[in-house]
Image (spheres, helix red, strand yellow):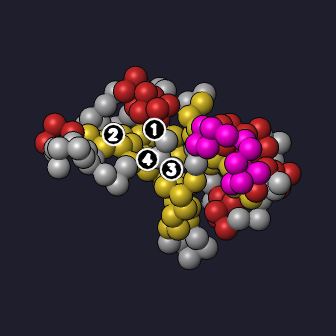
Amino acid sequence: MQHSIIRKGSAWQAAEICEFLDNSRIPVRLAGISSTGTPLICSLWYVYADGALWCATQSSSHIAGLLRRNPHCGFEIAADTLPYRGVRGQGQATLSSTAGPPTLLQLIDRYLEDRESDLAQWLLAKQADELAIRIEPLWITAWDYSARMPTASAA
């Protein structure tokens, strides 16, 4: 991750952000811009690789249509449980049908850890129409309230 894209005031620097993105199994909340200019948020599985967030979705999905019309997007990866921490930013999305099926396999391995489960088989049955979304961050920041909050087990 390039240090130049990390916002001043970020709770974490590049190494900590990369570690969080590599180790978190939280879906990314991806915001695309509708034709009326309003954001629409979609939660997707992601993998962090080569300085970008990679997701997969069906080619006909609403979020794919939004990103085709306007590749600018916002994103956030953060848990809904204590301690509150995460990353957010804005990026530029590119779509690839060629990278769709292999990205889907990476996501199944990351989130399900089992290609034989019913959900994995259902996703794999539709992989021919899968589209990869590559989100290149334009800026990114992190927040971490761990020091101010009890952990979930202590709460």
Select label 1 or label 2 by which is in front: 1
Mark 2 or mark 3, which is nearer the start of the sequence?
A: 3
Residue pictured at 74% horizontal, 44% vertical: 116
Mark 2 residue crowding within 10 angstroms, few (<14) / some (14–19) / many (20+) = many
Q: Can residue 4 be seen in this view?
A: no
What's the amino acid at mark 4?
A: Ile
Residue lying farthest to the right in this orientation: 128
Mark 2 or mark 1, which is nearer the start of the sequence?
A: 1
Q: Position of residue 66 (x, y in %)?
A: 65, 64
Answer left or right for 122 relative to 89: right
Q: Position of residue 64 (x, y in %)?
A: 69, 60
Of 116 and 90, nearer the camera is: 116
List the residue tagged with mark 4.
77
Q: Which mark is residue 107?
A: none
Q: What stretch is highlighted in magenta?
A: 110-121
Instruction: Establish if 94 lies above or below 14.
Output: below
List the residue tagged with mark 1.
24
